[in-house]
Image: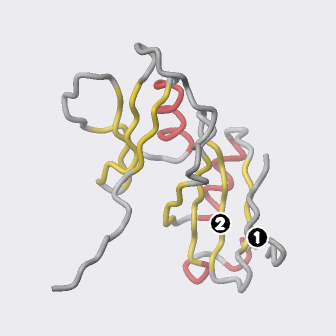
Amino acid sequence: MGVSVGVLDHFNIRTRNLQETVRFYEDVLGLENGDRPNFAFPGAWMYSEGRPVVHLVDISPTSEAQKPDSGVVHHVAFVSRGFAGMKARLAAKGMPFDARQVPGGELWQIFVRDPNGVMIELNYEAAKEQAEDAPDENSGDVGTMVAF
């Protein structure tokens, strides 16, 4: 019998800014705030295509310190669709972001930070997008990350 880790199920953010974080994932990224088990602590589950991919835990009732970013986890990535539409959405909301093309041109990316400083990477298959929307290719981008 073969073994496989599978695909990423969800990521969890512990936040002192629950409502602002929910708003970001709903209004900016287009996820839906959906059903969540009746845990003994407040939070929210954010859904993409029917799956709860972002779990939020409200730590404001506790003494736990808010971390300013995603710690040792550098970023979290989503396979996405609608590159031009997402760029327009982010610009309309005044969200700073960086759009780039992975060297070789087969993958386009958008990077944006949530209210907790977590870097979100949105990946788009170039073949499924409109060629005229292609971002610049950053051939010297090996191992670096967006700083905005």
Q: Residues within 10 Å of mark 2 (few under 14, many from 20)?
A: many
Marks 2 and 1, Cα distance to the nearest angstrom? Answer: 8 Å
81 to 117, vertically: above or below: below
From the top left corner, tell me how far across and down residue 77 is, in percent.
53, 60
From the top left corner, tell me how far across and down residue 60 is, in percent.
46, 17
- Amino acid type of disc 2? Gln
From the top left corner, tell me how far across and down residue 146 is, in percent.
76, 55
From the top left corner, tell me how far across and down residue 40 is, in percent.
23, 22
| Quarter where residue 111 is shown | bottom right
35 to 20, vertically: above or below: below
- Amino acid type of disc 1? Pro
Of residues 28 and 140, the one drawn nearer to the viewer in this rendering: 140
Identify the residue position indicated by label 1 in the image: 135
Of callouts 2 and 1, the N-terminal one: 2
Q: Are marks 2 and 1 in contact (CB under 8 Å)?
A: yes
Q: Residue at x 28, y 76 (%)?
A: 4
Q: Residue furthest left?
A: 1
Q: Residue at x 41, y 13 (%)?
A: 61
Identify the residue position indicated by label 2 in the image: 109
Q: Secondary structure at mark 2?
A: strand
Of residues 48 and 55, the one drawn nearer to the viewer in this rendering: 55
